[in-house]
Image (cartoon, helix red, strand yellow):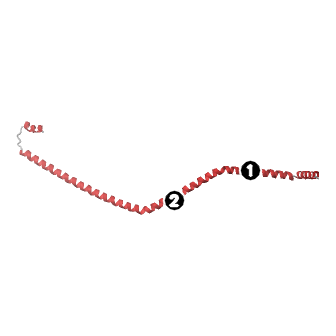
Amino acid sequence: MNKLIEFGKKALFYARVLSGYEERRIRSFRLEVEKRLKETNARKLALRKIPEQTILSEVRRMVEEMQTLNRKLEETEAQIEEYFKPIDKEAEMIMKTQLEGEERTMKEMMKAMHQQALLEKTEAEKEAQKKLETDQKNQESRPKTQDPASAAAPLKLR
């Protein structure tokens, strides 16, 4: 009986080989094995890339956080500038009024100094005029017949 079963198996095998069924089966098995190998290689590559991917995803996440932080910072700066705009305008107006006041006082001081200089100049001219007049009077009151040696003597003492 065993021989009959074996003979039947062999006959069926030959029939399958002759019909091409066994060849197709072997080919499909080989393709399936190749497909499994490709899938396992892809999984190996994916496992190797996981650390890279996690690092890249962390970097992306950090960059996004920094960008959002920068946006928030810019918005906050804009809000602060908007808040202080009226205060800045008031400070600018105060500074302008102070500068105008200082300019006015400086101009007034310049006028006063100019007037003082003119007064001093006129006083100096008056004093010079008086001195000239007194010198002329002194020269007129001196005798004109002095000898040149006596006139030079007081000059030497000086």
Q: Residues within 10 Å of mark 1 (few under 14, many from 20)?
A: few
Pick the front one: 97 or 5: 5
Circle on res. 141? none
Residue, disc 2: 72
* Distance Cα–Cα, label 2 vs label 1: 48 Å
Residue at x 75%, y 50% (from the top left corner) = 37
Residue at x 84%, y 52% (from the top left corner) = 25
**Residue 75's x, y, as percent?**
50, 60
**Residue 51's x, y, as percent?**
64, 50
Work out which residue is located at the far top of the displayed protein and give it. Answer: 149
Quarter occupied by residue 103? bottom left
**Residue 141's x, y, as percent?**
6, 45
Residue, disc 1: 38
Number of numbered discs: 2
Vertically, is 25 above or below 84? above
Pick the front one: 95 or 42: 42
Q: What is the secondary structure assignment of the residue under circle 1?
A: helix
In the displayed structure image, the side of residue 46 where residue 137 appears, left or right: left
Identity, as a three-letter code, of the amino acid under mark 2: Lys
Residue at x 76%, y 51% (from the top left corner) = 36
Q: Earlier in the sequence, mark 2 or mark 1?
A: 1
Identity, as a three-letter code, of the amino acid under mark 1: Lys
In the displayed structure image, the side of residue 148 where residue 44 appears, left or right: right
Quarter occupied by residue 143? top left
Q: What is the secondary structure assignment of the residue under circle 2?
A: helix
Residue at x 86%, y 53% (from the top left corner) = 21
In the displayed structure image, the side of residue 9 where residue 67 appears, left or right: left
Pick the front one: 6 or 125: 6
Q: Quadrant of the C terminus?
A: top left
